[in-house]
């Protein structure tokens, strides 16, 4: 989703909508922030608390980025959605 909004939307491909469906919020997909450059993304632009920065210093969180940059977020089932809303993630 960040790649779409930061690259393709700026080229005029901005009519698409992004839906992120999460299967398991326990797996966040964290990585060193510098790895964003390998995807052609601007590290300084995305390594911010309101974008993709993880709670740990110097890392980004792919799930957080997907949630922030998506137009809609869904889960695999209504039951899982209720579980996430009522219990949250067990991740510290």
Image: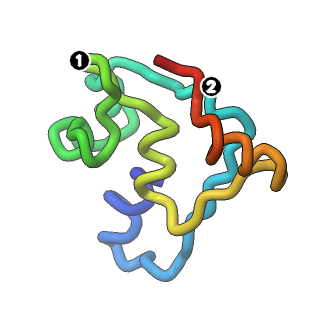
Across and down, in percent, residue 31 comes to 41, 20
Q: State the CA–CA distance, disc 1 to disc 2.
A: 19 Å
Name which quarter of the figure residue 19 lies in: bottom right
Residue lying farthest to the front in this orientation: 86
Number of marks present in the image shown: 2
Name which quarter of the figure residue 18 lies in: bottom right
Relative placement, left or right, of 24 versus 17 is right
Q: Is residue 75 above or below residue 35?
A: below
Relative placement, left or right, of 8 versus 47 is right
Residue pointed to by mark 1: 57
Query: Residue placed at 38% from the left, 62% from the top?
Result: 5
The dot on residue 26 is 2
Helix, strand or loop at disc 1?
A: loop
Query: How many C-alpha atoms fall within 10 Å of the one at disc 1: few (<14), some, or many (≥20)?
Result: few
The dot on residue 34 is none
Across and down, in percent, residue 53 comes to 29, 33
Across and down, in percent, residue 67 comes to 49, 51
């Amino acid at each position: 989703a960040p790649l779409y909004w930061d690259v393709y939307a700026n080229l005029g491909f901005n009519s698409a909508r992004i839906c992120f469906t999460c299967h398991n919020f326990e797996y966040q997909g964290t990585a060193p922030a510098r790895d964003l450059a390998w995807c052609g993304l601007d590290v300084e632009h995305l390594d911010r608390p309101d974008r993709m920065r993880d709670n740990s210093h110097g890392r980004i969180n792919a799930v957080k980025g997907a949630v922030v940059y998506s137009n809609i977020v869904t889960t695999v089932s209504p039951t899982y959605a209720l579980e996430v809303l009522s219990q949250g993630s067990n991740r510290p």
